[in-house]
Image (spheres, grey):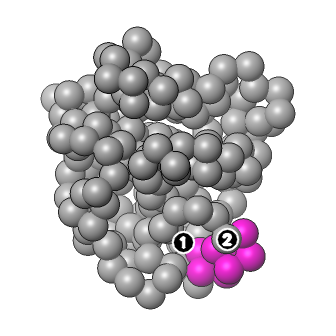
Amino acid sequence: MAFTLQPGEKAPDFALPATDGKTYRLPDFEDAPVLVIFFTCNHCPYVLGSDETTRATAEKFASRGVCFVGINSNSDQTHPEDSFQHMVARMEEKRFPWVYLHDESQDVARAYGALRTPHFYAFDRDRKLVYTGRALDNPREAEKSTVSDLESALEEVLAGKPVSVPLTNPIGCNVKWRGQDAHWMPAEACDLV
């Protein structure tokens, strides 16, 4: 079994606290025809370099029913700025158009097989995975990107077409696993393609 969810697999459920004070589960987003769940954080230069592009994509597709959900699974023992308190402050400052969930146990990151920040997962109406990987080919310097794999995948699934490139390798910092070196990744975690 692959570490990361594979196309066609169902989205695992979760119950996670958000920066808005609520707790969210997967069914809370059932009205969205397409759901994008992405693993992110507060400190990673790849996240910081592409957050505004992610915002633009979320806003561009919102009118077509696409919902974005950000999850921070990073250990704040590795990077204190990834704490829940810092998540709340970041959302107050940035006002991103998504709910921002905290996966303190890292169980959700394991269930999805999150490799890096950012790492995107797009699910269809039945919550089957249609795309996973990067959003951009240069998230650290988003203005230099020439390819938006996530937007291409969203256009195809919304048009009722199969996603032509369902897997790409996420580009970013590895998820910071509790009790591990900052660069550690699970042995079974490998490139997607």
Q: CA distance from mark 2 to mark 1?
A: 22 Å
Are there few (<14), some (14-19), or many (20+) residues within 10 Å of tag 2? few
Residue 54 at x, y percent in the picture: 63, 46
Q: What amino acid is found at the position of numbered circle 2 in the picture?
A: Arg
Task: Please state, as top left, top right, bottom left or bottom right, where the C terminus lies in the image.
Answer: top left
Are there few (<14), some (14-19), or many (20+) residues within 10 Å of tag 1? some
Q: Does any portion of residue 181 appear in the rendered image? A: no
Above or below for 14 versus 86: above
Residue 88 part of the magenta segment: yes
* Identity of the residue drawn at 72% across and 29% down: 138
* Identity of the residue drawn at 77% across and 36% down: 142
Residue 190 part of the magenta segment: no
**Nearer the observer, 91 or 82:** 91
Res. 76 mark: 1
Characterize the magenta stretch by its predominant secondary structure: helix
The mark nearer the N terminus, 2 or 1, is 1
Image side of residue 123 versus residue 21, left or right = left
Quadrant of the image occupied by residue 146: top right
Magenta segment range? 86-94
Above or below for 179 versus 48: below
Residue 19 at x, y percent in the picture: 51, 79
Q: Does any portion of residue 92 appear in the rendered image? A: yes
**Nearer the observer, 180 or 154:** 154
Please give the residue where the numbered disc 2 appears in the rendered image: 95
Image side of residue 64 versus residue 79, left or right = left
